[in-house]
Image (cartoon, helix red, strand yellow):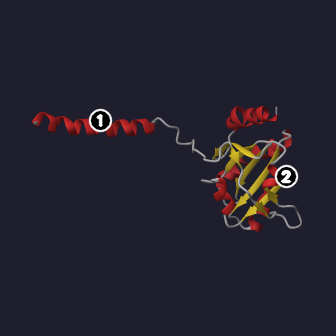
Amino acid sequence: MPRLLFILPLLLFGAIAAYFAVGLTKDPRILPSALIDRPAPEFDLPSLYTGRDGFAKANLVGEVTLVNVFASWCGPCRVEHPLLMRFAETNKTSLYGINYKDKKTDAVNWLKQLGDPYKRIGQDLSGRVGIEWGVYGLPETYIVDRDGRIRYRHVGPMQPDAMKDKILPLIEELKK
């Protein structure tokens, strides 16, 4: 009996250590999304620009699209913006934007300064649509297939390697 009392804490410590060791092997940049391979949520956002069409789920059906959630107050959004500008200039895939919890004037001025790569931009002042998309933090980028299903989610600022190795190959595969 005294031997069991000595071994039991060691076994308990070993089990806890194994549990945490497995958790440390996972990539913290990969955040699971319950929406992968599911239809994009229903939404209909007003345009960021006065007099232009807004952005709705209906815009995502019929072609492979890239949806980027951004804000002028988001530092990492500024980092990835030149990559999105190049994407819009060199790729025939539609790029849509969701301006998340941002002041209209700030967002418009930000895009005037840095350039506007988006085909349409919806203004999500309340953040409700972002929550429905499962936005965890900005920026986030989604690939949506022709049927309006979310096929990929990139969290954080996109880097050239992610664009070249993940985004563009998946877009090409989905276009086939």
Q: Considering the numbered disc 2 on the image, is that residue within a helix, a strand or a loop?
A: loop
Q: Where is residue 104 in the image (x, y as percent from the top left)?
A: 76, 67
Left or right of 171 on screen, residue 152: left
The kind of residue tagged 2 is Lys
Gap between marks 1 and 2, in whole Å? Answer: 55 Å
Mark 1 or mark 2: whose residue is earlier in sequence: 1
| Residue 116 in view, yes or no | no
Few, some or many C-alpha atoms within 10 Å of disc 1 (few <14, some 14-19, many ≥20)? Answer: few
| Residue 102 in view, yes or no | yes
Q: Position of residue 139 (x, y in %)?
A: 66, 51
Instruction: Give whichever of 72, 113 is nearer the camera.
Output: 72
The kind of residue tagged 1 is Gly
Instruction: Give whichever of 171, 90 is nearer the camera.
Output: 171
Q: In which quarter of the image is the C terminus?
A: top right
Q: Residue at x 10, y 36 (%)?
A: 1
Residue where numbered disc 2 is placed: 119
Left or right of 115 on screen, residue 4: left
**Mark 1 and mark 2 residues within 8 Å of each other at the beta carbon:** no
Q: Which residue lies furthest to the right in this view?
A: 51
Circle on res. 14: 1
Instruction: Give whichever of 99, 153 is nearer the camera.
Output: 153
Q: Which residue is drawn at 77% across and 35% down?
A: 174
Q: Residue furthest left?
A: 2
